[in-house]
Image: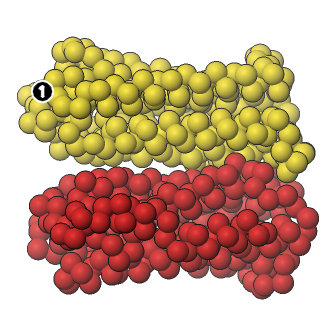
Chain colours: A red, B yellow
């Protein structure tokens, strides 16, 4: 969806689009800052020692990944450059997500807490698979797959936000015995949750406006060699390298 | 979105549409049954006594409301009948949601647990307001408001599911001290969560297919008197009766 927006510059309603774009960027930035303030001010800070400070990378990196994943951007540039930006942002988001999960696994293992028991973890880890499926780096997308690509991109975006909200709920219930008395940390982190929801709502609005979409005939342009190498393409799409690396890592731990 | 689907009967791909429709209906039915099994078999059953049995209406009614809210249905019928079904299902969902919230407030009050402290409650109750806004019962919708109506309908649908997942997380952490050891109840309720997510994903797919939408020129037909009574219409849309009743109830409690 974000890949469609640069075209907007030459269409109507540029001001309204710009206002939404700036709002979303601002909201995203504030959300990342809030997640850092949370762990630095109210929690044990950041570190990589198998303790709570390592766990704290999880919320910070996931919030950053959510923002980077659908970072709204607009650019008067070639389709190729635009695709590289889209792929680049998605790769960064994927790396952030994987590192954030490694932090939790290491924290759990160090404390002998079982992995993968909560609904949050089930949904969170499940999302890595379709995320990997939608990541077809450096391979032009077949026109027939485009609707599925756009749909799954947005579905993953929404599901990651839902998962983040469950994570916030879990973390507050674990770490704040006085959650029900609404101490400052509870209010602060609830607001972080609302910020993420608002960011998501804005992005969904921008992504679902038909007149802010790249005209369909341009989406339909496919690299001709794909018609010959369809299976090769689909295999590389389904099993990108970072996905296999993650499977390997999880099987070992 | 659901209101657009009856048109599909006279369009292409009827079999695939029907398969999705039946799958979504089935998933929704199984999810409601699972929520009932959860409270009857693993929890304290159902009742209206200010205790845990009253609280248990909350998950059962919310899951039912989610399914009813976007119940996929298809019908070769007039636009008016279709609108009545759409409005009727939404009213039922709204009533279920309100009763489910009353159950929690009464349970909290009886046990002297504070209300509205968790992110789940913040998001859950916040959703009632935009839900009320999208409910413009018996008032034809202005064409200009249609995109906002469709967007907010789907956004509320997604947000209610996210909120339900947070609720499941909360309930399991509160009631299952052994959640991390994955007892049968934990697995069962996690699966209920996945069922709800799958139902949501199916509905979003069906609702976002452009060729399953009512042709735009039909959406544009508006009752002519609305052009004269715009403000009246907007006021009635923003403050429907059941919304005011809920505010009154919450202020009193």
Is B33 located above or below residue B209 in the figure?
above
- Asked whether the viewer can see residue B139, the reply is no
Is A243 located above or below residue B130 in the figure?
below
**Crowding near the residue tagged with mark 1, few <14, some 14–19, many ≥20 C-alpha atoms within 10 Å:** few
Q: Position of residue A67 (x, y in %)?
A: 48, 72
Is B150 located above or below residue A217 in the figure?
above
Q: Position of residue A33 (x, y in %)?
A: 58, 79
Q: Work out whether residue B234 or residue A208 is closer to the camera in this orientation and state it.
A: A208
Q: Position of residue A28 (x, y in %)?
A: 48, 73
- The residue shown at (13%, 35%) is B215
Report whether B75 appears left or right of A128.
left
- The residue shown at (50%, 36%) is B199
Query: Please, which residue is most extreme toward the front here?
Result: A228
* Image quadrant in which the C terminus of chain B is located: top right
- Asked whether the viewer can see residue A100, the reply is yes
Report whether B40 appears left or right of B65.
right
Q: Work out whether residue A86 or residue B235 is closer to the camera in this orientation and state it.
A: A86
Q: Work out whether residue B214 or residue B188 is closer to the camera in this orientation and state it.
A: B188
Q: Position of residue B190 (x, y in %)?
A: 70, 41
Q: In terms of secondary structure, where does tag 1 sit?
A: loop
* Image quadrant in which the N terminus of chain B is located: top left
From the image, tell me which residue sits under label 1: B223
Residue A8: quadrant of the picture = bottom left
- The residue shown at (89%, 72%) is A110
Report whether A190 appears left or right of A9.
right
- The residue shown at (85%, 77%) is A51
Q: Work out whether residue A191 or residue B158 is closer to the camera in this orientation and state it.
A: B158
Report whether B72 appears left or right of A160.
left
Q: Chain under label 1?
A: B
Q: How many marks?
A: 1
Residue A103: quadrant of the picture = bottom right
């Amino acid at each position: 969806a974000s890949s469609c927006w640069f075209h907007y510059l030459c269409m109507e309603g540029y001001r309204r689009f710009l206002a939404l774009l700036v709002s979303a960027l601002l909201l995203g930035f504030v959300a990342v800052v809030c997640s850092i303030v949370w762990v630095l001010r109210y929690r044990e800070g950041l570190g990589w020692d198998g303790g709570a400070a390592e766990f704290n990378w999880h919320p910070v990196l996931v919030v950053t990944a959510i923002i980077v994943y659908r970072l709204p951007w607009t650019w008067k540039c070639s389709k190729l450059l635009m695709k590289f930006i889209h792929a680049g942002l998605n790769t960064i988001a994927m790396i952030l997500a994987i590192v954030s999960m490694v932090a939790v696994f290491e924290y759990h293992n160090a404390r002998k807490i079982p992995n993968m028991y909560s609904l949050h973890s089930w949904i969170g880890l499940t999302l890595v698979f379709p995320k990997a499926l939608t990541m077809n780096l450096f391979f032009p997308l077949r026109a027939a797959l485009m609707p599925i690509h756009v749909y799954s991109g947005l579905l993953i975006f929404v599901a990651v936000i839902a998962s983040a909200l469950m994570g916030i709920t879990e973390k507050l219930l674990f770490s704040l015995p006085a959650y029900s008395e609404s101490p400052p940390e509870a209010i602060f982190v609830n607001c972080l949750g609302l910020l993420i929801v608002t960011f998501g709502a804005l992005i969904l609005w921008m992504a679902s406006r038909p007149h802010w979409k790249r005209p369909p005939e341009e989406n339909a342009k496919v690299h001709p060699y794909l018609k010959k190498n369809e299976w090769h393409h689909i295999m590389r799409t389904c099993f990108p390298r970072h996905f296999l690396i993650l499977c390997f890592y999880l099987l070992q731990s």
